Image: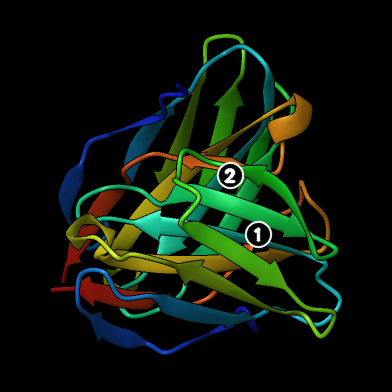
Amino acid sequence: ETGVTQSPTHLIKTRGQQVTLRCSSQSGHNTVSWYQQALGQGPQFIFQYYREEENGRGNFPPRFSGLQFPNYSSELNVNALELDDSALYLCASSPGTSETQYFGPGTRLLVL
Amino acid sequence: ILNVEQSPQSLHVQEGDSTNFTCSFPSSNFYALHWYRWETAKSPEALFVMTLNGDEKKKGRISATLNTKEGYSYLYIKGSQPEDSATYLCAFASGGTSYGKLTFGQGTILTVHP
């Protein structure tokens, strides 16, 4: 077990809605990264937060946003959901920005 | 756009066979190469983080090598067991301001038959 948890495990939304996914990092890990894994592909980097500030972003539109809190929890928010947002969303925490990343089990999002 | 390629996409072996897979990555601006094992319904598990050209790492029956000059890493499993069945992912971390970002390959799905 990595000590990283995510909620919910599964979620169904309709196009145009908004969703919030949650992640609880290992204690002491001040960095959290979020990834999207579409079917048949490797995880794709969405963004990283370090000490509550965004520290790098992948090729995702602004409707993907995040927050990191002092209690080692974080959120991924997606507005105006599209069908292509259906995927597994993974969060990963690490003690620093370039260390080994410890992954949660993911949240599977289905957009209808 | 960084390109990380893994081969083969999938592999079926018999228990006791040894096997290996390849990860290819850009040879410029290298910072680190990560290997993960991902079993169904579980979290990806970190196997190795490799940073130096010529690095060799070992964990039980699994080992990995790294060639940063030519941009490839091999993962070896000796005497495969059914519990080794999983997806094996490699991820490239580049230097500079994006060193926290991992670019993943699509994975190699290993199935070990008893």
Residue B89: mark in rendering: none
Q: Residue at x 51, y 51 (%)?
A: A46
Read off the residue under disc 1. Answer: A101
Q: Residue B17 location in percent, x, y?
A: 25, 52
Q: Residue at x 53, y 70 (%)?
A: A76
Q: Chain of mark 1?
A: A
Question: Is disc 1 placed on a helix, strand or loop?
Answer: loop
Which corner quadrant holds the C terminus of chain A? bottom left
Q: Picture quarter containing residue B49?
A: top right
| Up/down of A58 relative to B109, above or below | above
Q: Amino acid at mark 1?
A: Gln
Q: Check whether the beta carbons of the residues at disc 1 and disc 2 lie within 8 A of each other.
A: yes
Read off the residue under disc 2. Answer: B34
- Which of the colour schemes (rainbow, by chain, secondary structure, one colour) is used? rainbow
Q: Chain of mark 2?
A: B
Q: Is residue A2 left or right of residue B52?
A: left
Report the mark closest to the observer, 1 or 2.
Answer: 1
Q: Amino acid at mark 2?
A: His
Q: Is residue A96 left or right of residue A86?
A: right
Residue found at the very far bottom of the displayed protein: A8
Q: Picture quarter containing residue B39?
A: bottom left
